[in-house]
Amino acid sequence: MKTTVNYLMPIIASVLVTVACGNSTSRHSEEQIQEINEQAQFPDSVKPTETTRFDFENYTAGQLPDDWSEYYTGSGGTEWKVTEDNGNKVLAQLYSDNPNNHFNIVVNKDITAKDMVLTVRLKGVTGNHDQGGGFVWRFTDKNNYYVVRANPLENNVVLYKVENGKRTDLPLVGKGRTYGVDVPPMGNRWHTLKLIVKDDVFTVLLEDKELFKVQDKTFTKASKVGFWTKADAVTYFDDFEIQRFK
């Protein structure tokens, strides 16, 4: 199953939300929010320079494909492999005995991108400390990158930066630092996560519904893309699509 990119982004309501005491805030005027929306849109005349898709069917089960590299931080291990899911091949993180301070990462060796649309189907299978996962992009090394993940244990979607090994959730445009957004109960079903990256604006969608935007300038160069899970989360990824733009 593939998801078609919708280039006409919804307009964020021109509302400023005061964030609860104790959280740092990110306030924007109506004009700033409108400008951020415009920045996040790809003009109709812009076409993908290249689209790459992975359904993992041509890879050997039980192995990490040669064109992918795995990393982790924290104590424990990581085990990214192609596995079978009801007769369908998926890329999975299978190591299930990690502590809560552990991050699992896998990136494609051959793809480098700055502005792009990423789409994937993901399923959180198990995990006591954490579940689910999501995208990494602008990946410099295992200690420096962006990540957005959907977590069925918490039923929320959060976008972070990991800088020098420290993970920090980023404020949402027009809302401030809310620790992402809550979503309906996810369970251990398949869900479609999408990310639109345009310069320093990142738009996150779940089931093709826009959840939020984040604006951040920490990592600006074209870099690797891939997947991320935390702690003991066993997660399946399938139908990964990368659309790169000039």
Image: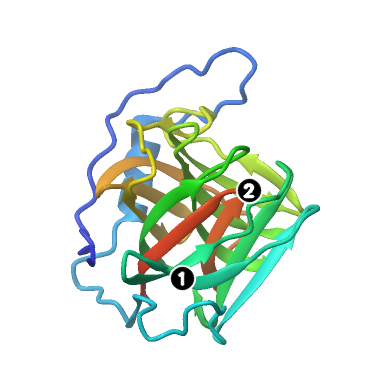
| Percent coordinates x, y for residue 185 in the rendering | 35, 32
Q: Is residue 155 above or below residue 65?
A: above
The amino acid on which the numbered mark 1 sits, given as a three-letter code, is Thr
| Residue for point 55% across, 49% down | 216
Q: Is residue 67 left or right of residue 4?
A: right
User: Mark 1: which secondary structure?
Assistant: strand
| Residue for point 62% across, 63% down | 105
**Residue that sits furthest to the right in the current view:** 75
* Res 54 quadrant in image: bottom left
Observer-nearest of 152 and 158: 152
Observer-nearest of 82 and 27: 82
Residue at label 2? 232
The amino acid on which the numbered mark 2 sits, given as a three-letter code, is Asp
| Percent coordinates x, y for residue 84 in the rendering | 40, 69
| Residue for point 44% across, 38% down | 152
Observer-nearest of 203 and 188: 188
| Residue for point 20% across, 64% down | 4
* Res 174 quadrant in image: top left
Residue at label 1? 83
